[in-house]
Amino acid sequence: MNQSTPPTKRTRRFRLHRRYTPVVFAFYMAGIMALLMCAVIVGFNQGITEDFLARVIHAYIVAMPVAFVCVLFVRPLVMKLVGLTIDQST
């Protein structure tokens, strides 16, 4: 394929600018962690029954936005703690 050929619609992807990295990181981190925590807590407290998935999704609807906001605010502190913990000289 010639390098001057524009990409087809199949190969084209929507990507955000790198300045949004902290927000995208927070979104994915919050989404994954909230889902895992909801599943563990619901399973631990109420057991794994027929309506387990429905209860997890119900809890996730509440937990995901809260986790997202928390990760946005906590990330700078965590980055500072990592910087203090990791040896930067190597």
Image (tube, rainbow, N blue to C red):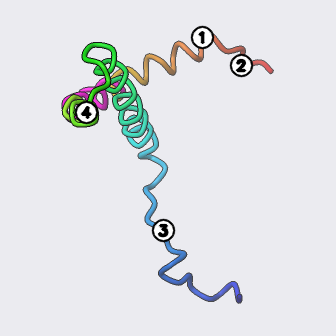
> Amino acid type of disc 3?
Arg
Q: CA distance from mark 2 to mark 3?
A: 35 Å
Measured as percent of width and height from the top left, residue 59 is found at 22, 28
Chain-order first, disc 2 or disc 3: 3
What segment is highlighted magenta in the picture? Answer: 60-71
Measured as percent of width and height from the top left, residue 3 is found at 69, 84
Residue 38 in which image quadrant: top left
Q: CA distance from mark 4 to mark 2?
A: 51 Å
Q: Which residue is mark 3?
A: 13
Magenta residue check for 22:
no
> Amino acid type of disc 1?
Leu
- Along the line of sight, the residue nearer the viewer: 86 or 53: 53
Q: Which residue is mark 1?
A: 84
Please tell me whether mark 1 sits on a helix, a strand or a loop: helix
Residue 73 in which image quadrant: top left
> Amino acid type of disc 4?
Glu
Q: Which residue is mark 4?
A: 50
Chain-order first, disc 4 or disc 1: 4
